[in-house]
Amino acid sequence: MTSAPEAGSTGLTLSGDPEPAPSPYRWAWYLPGLVAVGWGFYGLLTAPMGPDPLQWVLFTALGVAGHDLVLVPVAVGVGLLVARILPKVLRAPAQVGLIGTGIALVAGFAYILGPGVSADVPSALPFNYAGRVAVLLAVLWVAMAGWAVLRIVRARSRSPSRSGSRRAGDADQPE
């Protein structure tokens, strides 16, 4: 038999511990998103040509389907693979690196493909964006490798020596 939730809690979670009540300041985090959504609807409804409902619904449906049927399963699969293959000390740097790689590739995808590049307008996308994304990813993974080395060194310094040498606490023990 379970006891009633504590005052100020929202009920039981999967771990059985009561979840704390949400902070009243939590709603302040939702405000920028609501403003962005409102601005998007305003732009959609006041476009000079008027919204094309079929294209808008198709774009939204494909975006949701692409997220739920492609992006999420790939992310979950890679996360499970990382959790099974890598030792615990290397998981956080690998996960941050993979998430950062995904964000950089998604953000730079349109620039890498180069739609809008025109010989008539040389200032439209004038840089080598694929090279710049590659440099960004190299910097990211060098930083993740440094973080991983730091975690390995810290883990080894905390663990007892495996070489069979005497520990500091053993010095006063007679042989």
Image (cartoon, rainbow, N blue to C red):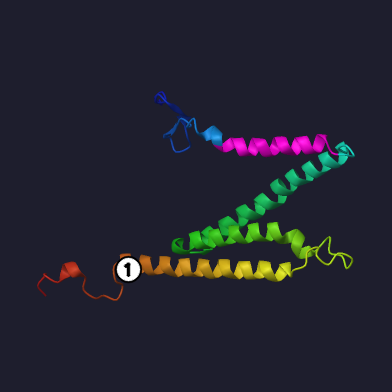
Q: In x, y percent, where is residue 77?
A: 62, 55
Residue at x 74%, y 49% (from the top left corner)? 66
Q: Nearer the viewer, residue 75 or 112?
A: 112
Q: Amino acid at mark 1?
A: Ser
> In the displayed structure, does residue 61 sit left or right of residue 81?
right
Residue at x 45%, y 61% (from the top left corner)? 88
Q: Nearer the viewer, residue 136 or 35?
A: 35
Magenta part of the protein: which range?
Answer: 29-47
Farthest residue to the left: give it: 174
Q: How many marks?
A: 1
Q: In x, y percent, where is residue 29?
A: 56, 38
Vertical relation: 94 (above or below) 66: below
Residue at x 77%, y 67% (from the top left corner)? 126
> In the displayed structure, does residue 55 sit left or right of residue 135?
right
Q: Quadrant of the C terminus?
A: bottom left
Residue at x 74%, y 68% (from the top left corner)? 127
Vertical relation: 59 (above or below) 173: above
> In the displayed structure, does residue 147 sit left or right of residue 27?
left
The main secondary structure of the magenta stretch is helix
**Dot 1: element:** helix
Q: In x, y percent, where is residue 82?
A: 55, 60
Residue 54 figure quarter: top right
Q: Which residue is under mark 1?
A: 157
> Dot 1: few (<14), some (14–19), or many (≥20) neighbours within 10 Å?
few
Vertical relation: 174 (above or below) 87: below
Q: Is residue 103 magenta?
A: no
Residue 81 figure quarter: bottom right
Residue 171 figure quarter: bottom left
Q: In x, y percent, where is residue 143?
A: 52, 67
Q: Nearer the viewer, residue 162 or 6?
A: 6
Q: Is residue 37 magenta?
A: yes
> In the displayed structure, does residue 56 sit left or right of residue 147?
right
